[in-house]
Image (cartoon, rainbow, N blue to C red):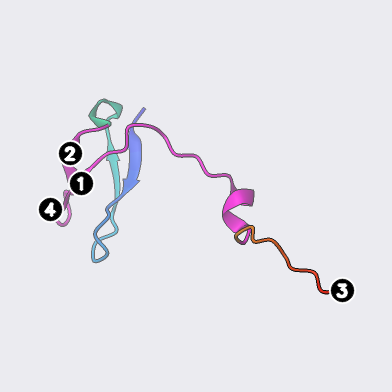
Amino acid sequence: MPVTLLCPSLRCRAVLQVPDTVRGKAVRCGHCGTVFSVPLTKQVVSRVEASRPSAEPEEKTV
């Protein structure tokens, strides 16, 4: 199953699809030429965790 990535270049940000066999290897963006490495594992972030603000303890004043 192909891996879908976003080019890390802030000027490009192209959506790329690379084969699963290149995980952990360096690849070059076909649009801008930026070289970057493909993550080894899939990073899954649930929408609930992503939308929560940082968990900072609230101070109670009595």
Q: Secondary structure at mark 2?
A: strand
Provide the secondary structure element on which disc 3 rests.
loop
Sequence-first tag of 1 and 3: 1
**What's the residue type where badge 1 is placed?**
Phe
Work out whether 21 lies above or below 56: above
Residue 24's spot in the image, x, y percent? 25, 32
Residue in the image at 15% along x and 57% along y: 32
For badge 3, the amino acid type reads: Val
As drawn, the label of residue 62 is 3
Residue pointed to by mark 1: 36
Res. 45 mark: none
Q: Nearer the viewer, residue 4 or 26?
A: 26
Magenta residues: mostly which secondary structure? loop
Tag 2 and tag 1, C-beta contact below 8 Å? yes
Select label 1 or label 4 by which is in front: 1
**Separation (CA) of disc 2 from disc 4:** 12 Å
| Residue contact at pointers 3 and 4, CB within 8 angstroms | no
Which secondary structure, mark 4? loop
| Residue in view at x 35 percent, y 41 percent | 4
3D distance between C-alphas at marks 3 and 2: 56 Å
